[in-house]
Amino acid sequence: MKLFGKVLDERQESEAMRVERVGFYGILFGLLLVIIVQVLAFGKNAHVHGELIVMTAGAIWGGIGYFRRGIYDPFTKPGMKSYITYGIITGVICGVLFSPPKYLSYGAYGLYLRIFAKYFTIMFAIGFIVYLLVGTVTKARQRKLQTKYEDDGKGI
């Protein structure tokens, strides 16, 4: 016996999904902002383990859901432009997070920029490769789902 039945029509369900998506991304980016502020304020003494665990679990959960449905990103399609853009974003975020802010307080801007450039380059390369792999897997999944849906339609 079902305890609760579906009470939303398709339009309401679509609107509910938009609300849930905004909430999901709000939580992920809010956690990222909290982590950035704590790392910049406390440096190596920042205790962000809980935030990282929650953010990582949410990102993995969302990623698996997207993979299963053949969705790369709600806003872009897999391609070189998105791989490079997301790689740059990853590099900038990690460069800011991992470059020690103490060099800025000492006025050693050149050293800070060199450290930032090192982290940016490494994380851009890693991010680009990860996005390239995810995009390739997503395209393959989309092809598989497309042939599955085409095969299902032949019996009608």
Image (tube, rainbow, N blue to C red):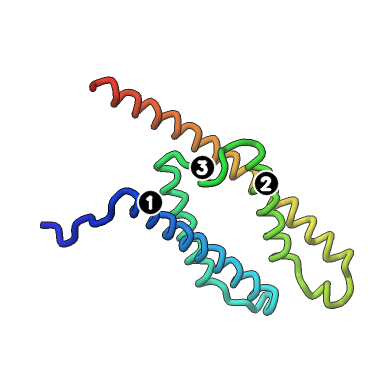
Which marked residue is nearer to the observer: mark 1 or mark 2? Answer: 1
In the picture of the structure, the residue carrying the numbered disc 2 is 85
Q: Earlier in the sequence, mark 2 or mark 3?
A: 3
Q: Identify the residue under disc 3.
A: 72
Which of disc 1 and disc 3 is earlier in sequence? 1
- Label 1: how many residues lie within 10 Å, few (<14), some (14-19) or many (20+)? few
Q: Taking 57 as reference, is 87 above or below it?
A: above
Nearer the observer, 57 or 32: 32
Q: What residue type is labelled 2?
A: Thr
- Local packing at callout 3 (Cα closer than 10 Å; few below 14, some 14-19, many 20+) is many
Mark 1–mark 2 Cα distance, whole angstroms, equals 29 Å
Under mark 1, the amino acid is Ser
Q: Give the amino acid at mark 3.
A: Tyr
Residue 115 vs residue 25, the one in the foreground: 25
Query: 3 and 125: which one is in front?
Result: 3
Q: What element carries label 3?
A: loop
Using the image, determine if residue 46 lies above or below residue 126.
below
Task: Say which residue appears at 65% left-offset and 74% top-offset.
Answer: 37
Q: Residue 14 carries which label?
A: 1
